[in-house]
Amino acid sequence: MSENERHHESQDARPDTRGRLYGVGLGPGDPALMTVRAVRVIAEADVIAYHSARHGRSIARSIAAEHLRPDHIEEALVYPVTTETTDHPGGYRGAIDEFYEQAAARLAAHLDAGRTVAVLAEGDPLFYGSYMHMHKRLADRYPTEVIPGVTSVSGAAARLGTPLAEAEEVLTILPGTLPEEELTARLAGTDAAVVMKLGRTFPTVRRAFERSGRLPEAHFVERATMAGERTAALADVDADSVPYFSLAVLPSRIGNPRPPVESGEGSGEVVVVGTGPAGPLWLTPETRGALAAATDLVGYTTYLDRVPVRPGQRRHGSDNKVEAERAAFALDLALRGHRVAVVSGGDPGVFAMATAVLEAASQEEYADVPVRVLPGVTAANAAAARVGAPLGHDYAALSLSDRLKPWEVIAERLHAAASADLVLALYNPGSRSRTWQVGKARELLLEHRAPDTPVVLARDVGGPEESVRVVRLADLDPAAVDMRTLLIVGSSQTRTVRRSDGGEEVVWTPRRYPEG
């Protein structure tokens, strides 16, 4: 064995003299909610570290105060800034990063000296806490243990005495520092939520709750489990009274249902929503929120099956050919105080239920029923995205169904759109009872388009039987088209290319049109 090898072997055999780092979760504020393990670690530590603002007062230290010894070495890690206003050359982020590096170096000096360091953290150390910044800088260099704690979220729910989430509900945790638009979208699209870091963000947070339609459900919790605790309806809270150490809570809708008001005075509403071409991936946050808030869902059974079942929510499915009856039924429910979501596929305003609902709502008996239409991803956009950008220039959307308009009108519009050199998105091209329309449409289009014009056949986009392929217009086979298929017929400018050997064909229509 060489001298160098013997040196390394002796080094490896030495006991590890480094100290141990602990991230100690203290719970939401009441010292009685500290875990037994947290108390034990604090009692045995050599160094107690805690973060504080420049005033020097530390909430974490005050929670653990009764367990501190006179001989504890205390390290107060005082933030140099508490707002984003600073003259540091790196700005706010630069000042904070420099502070974390310096704080970690101070703790590392104790750990190198063999001392045990307990970093105190309100709530849980790895949940929006300051400790995590020490953890990221030290845990790979020293033996480390994290002691979990009761979060402020759990403390707030306990003080409100209401379930946060039940069954298949989704609970979303949001920082109040998010942009208002992002907060609004997240609140609209979730079942239950908690917004943290209020204080100066409160006006923005409140507007987001209001814009998402969730303000009536929201609660405010300040200093849960601590002295000075306060709970209130979020709508009633004065922004000037809100500290950083507070939360906005949207509890479980199942645990806190808002029953319909059977007043017969038009206190309900109808929201027409589009589920997109397939399942949940295609839903907008606004649509998710409307579906969750509804007391009743009304729609074609196939589309209702895309919506998760929620306890207490009534579902009224019907056949695809009773749109007028379905619309009137939804409006009648709203007259009795129900919050009704009429569920449509794709975008509700494109060959779908929005027209039927608005037509019925124009009758005098429904004049006072609020009706809203929320957009969805329509089949043409979904199909186009699968192959590239065939709708990149002017295009027309037509339905080939002659159930609600005569074929003569369809043929005239096909001629007009084709002669104008528009890309065509053809909805409802065929079904078991309509078998000749695609062939006739191909004949009409070949009068204006070259045989090799690309045609996208998109079937069940987003669904389990999705099939998307590109064929020449002359080769379009009507037998390959059914009611679940959408056709996109290119213009004279639409291009196709295979971007790699054997790769899928990409289709796009240039945005620049040749000069005449």
Image (cartoon, rainbow, N blue to C red):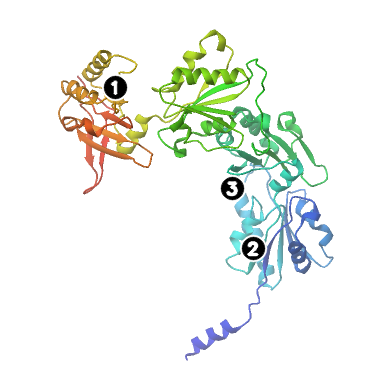
Q: Label for residue 93? A: 3
First of labels 3, 2 by sequence position: 3
Picture quadrant of residue 320: top left
Residue at coordinates 60% horizontally, 17% vertically from top-left? 335
Dot 1: what SS?
loop
x%, y% of residue 140? Answer: 57, 66
Dot 2: what SS?
helix
Quadrant occupied by the C terminus: top left
Badge nearest the viewer, 1 or 3 = 1
Cβ–Cβ under 8 Å for marks 1 and 3: no
**Between marks 3 and 2, how big is the CA–CA gap?**
18 Å
Q: How would you rate the neighbour count of disc 2 (Cα within 10 Å): few for under 14, some for 14-19, many for 20 or more?
A: some
Q: Could one spot residue 278 in this view of the protein?
A: yes
**In the rendered image of this protein, does residue 141 appear above or below residue 159?**
below
Picture quadrant of residue 311: top right
Camera-nearest residue between 266 and 30: 266
Instruction: Give the residue type that dot 1 points to.
Output: Leu
